[in-house]
């Protein structure tokens, strides 16, 4: 008897991905045109590259959405090993490329990849495969919880050597969501949370620039031309936007006020040009994406698919919360892009690849 073909992917989920990607392409041009013309003599420099990355990402999304997600269980271990090799290679002088003060790139010239971005998905795939094994003792601290924590801690430590606190935080956040969903003890996680908070405080204290970001977050106007500059300029962009915004392309803060307006702070330019309505629309699209992703995780018939869906949704949610939290002044400044919206090659391609896997899982959801 011929096996029936699985139904189509979740159309709500797919529509949110395409909608956010389209908004992102428009905003990359609008937010980055001034900087692109000043730096490269071409107002379309960033948007042309974003279109290229979007094309590659959509091809990758189509590929992963077409493959039965259960096959990734077979390749989870070698893929994680490749990610670790690339992370270490970045730290080797002459191989790793320094950009923005961090040695976190591999590539030639203006084209490159950021291995820490791919480690996020590699870790999610591996943890979903590992923790979904029948009889895994997740309730045990030593034999169940400690091994995956040690693995994620190792990856986080290597990423911090670059350093890249933002990407490392997203990876750890998504990993902890998977571990919690797998059934880890709340008492164990609570104790680890206290230890993690102490470790985070130590990381901040160890680097003066991170400590300045914390103090600037608490009172950005105490150093308006230094550590508090980004937050203040971001708020100056969001405030005048009002309900409907100044109009697409009419931002004033993108004229050399908000640093790198096409990447980490693109949401502030979006809020300035499209107002509260535009910002709320983007947030609602992310909310629907997360809702449909969690619905998929709850209704897929196997534990591996459930944990994998939770990890991908967690990665998106953590990244969105941190990015928008930074832009509106609720969190200290970290270098994290807004998924599907911000300019970026590795981040956009990786996100679309991961969402393709989520779309495939949604085909099997009940």
Image (spheres, rainbow, N blue to C red):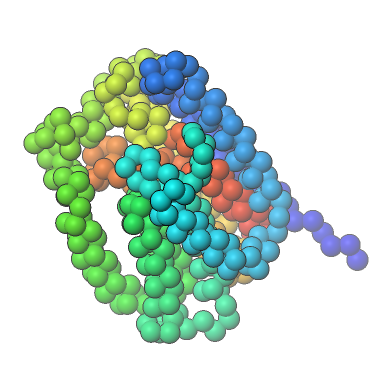
Viewer-closest of 353 and 241: 353
User: In the shown orientation, is residue 64 left or right of residue 49?
Assistant: right
Q: 343 or 95: which is nearer to us?
A: 95
Q: Is residue 329 left or right of residue 340?
A: left
Number of disc labels: 0
Give the x, y percent position of residue 12: 59, 43
Which residue lies at the image location 71% right of the left edge and 51% below the top edge?
A: 66
Residue most toward the right? 1
Please tell me whether residue 16 is drawn above or below residue 270 in the rendered image: below
Q: In which quadrant will I find the C terminus?
A: bottom right
Side (left or right) of 356 relative to 258: right
Q: Residue at x 38, y 27 (%)?
A: 270
Residue farthest toward the left in the current orientation of the protein: 222
Residue 33, picture quadrant: top left
Mark yes or no: residue 150 visible. yes
Q: Which residue is at the far front? A: 94
Q: Is residue 235 visible?
A: no
Measured as percent of width and height from the top left, residue 110 is found at: 49, 33
Answer above or below: position of 175 versus 252: below
Residue 61 shown left or right of residue 252 in the figure: right
Q: Position of residue 112 (x, y in %)?
A: 51, 41
Residue 108 is situated, as x and y percent measured from the top left of the image, at 51, 39
Quarter in which the N terminus is drawn: bottom right
Q: Answer above or below: position of 347 versus 132.
A: above
Q: Which residue is drawn at 22% across and 35% down?
A: 231
Q: Residue at x 24, y 65 (%)?
A: 199
Choose top left, top right, bottom left or bottom right for residue 203: bottom left
């Amino acid at each position: 008897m011929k096996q029936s073909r699985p139904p189509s992917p979740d159309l709500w989920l797919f529509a949110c991905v395409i909608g956010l990607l389209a908004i992102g392409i428009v905003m990359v041009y609008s937010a980055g045109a001034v900087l692109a013309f000043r730096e490269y003599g071409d107002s379309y420099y960033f948007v042309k590259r974003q279109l290229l990355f979007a094309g590659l990402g959509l091809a990758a999304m189509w590929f992963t959405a077409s493959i039965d997600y259960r096959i990734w269980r077979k390749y989870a271990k070698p893929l994680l090993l490749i990610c670790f090799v690339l992370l270490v290679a970045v730290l080797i002088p002459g191989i790793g490329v320094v950009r923005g003060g961090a040695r976190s790139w591999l590539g030639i010239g203006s084209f490159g990849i950021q291995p820490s971005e791919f480690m996020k998905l590699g870790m999610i795939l591996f943890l979903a495969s590992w923790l979904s094994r029948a009889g895994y003792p997740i309730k045990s601290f030593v034999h169940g919880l400690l091994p995956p924590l040690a693995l994620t801690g190792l990856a986080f430590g290597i990423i911090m050597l670059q350093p890249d606190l933002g990407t490392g935080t997203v990876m750890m956040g998504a990993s902890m969501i998977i571990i919690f969903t797998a059934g880890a003890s709340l008492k164990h996680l609570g104790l680890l949370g206290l230890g993690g908070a102490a470790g985070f405080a130590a990381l901040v204290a160890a680097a003066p620039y991170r400590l300045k970001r914390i103090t600037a977050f608490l009172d950005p106007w105490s150093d308006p031309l230094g550590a508090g500059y980004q937050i203040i300029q971001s708020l100056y962009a969001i405030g005048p936007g009002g309900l409907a915004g100044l109009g697409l392309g009419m931002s004033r803060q993108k004229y050399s006020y908000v640093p790198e307006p096409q990447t980490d702070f693109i949401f502030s330019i979006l809020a300035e040009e499209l107002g509260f309505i535009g910002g709320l629309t983007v947030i609602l699209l992310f909310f629907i994406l997360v809702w449909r992703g969690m619905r998929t995780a709850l209704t897929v018939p196997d534990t591996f698919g459930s944990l994998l869906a939770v990890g991908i949704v967690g990665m998106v949610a953590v990244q969105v919360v941190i990015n928008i939290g930074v832009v509106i002044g609720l969190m200290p400044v970290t270098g994290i892009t807004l998924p599907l919206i911000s300019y970026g090659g590795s981040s956009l391609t990786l996100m679309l690849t991961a969402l393709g896997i989520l779309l495939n899982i949604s085909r099997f959801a009940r």
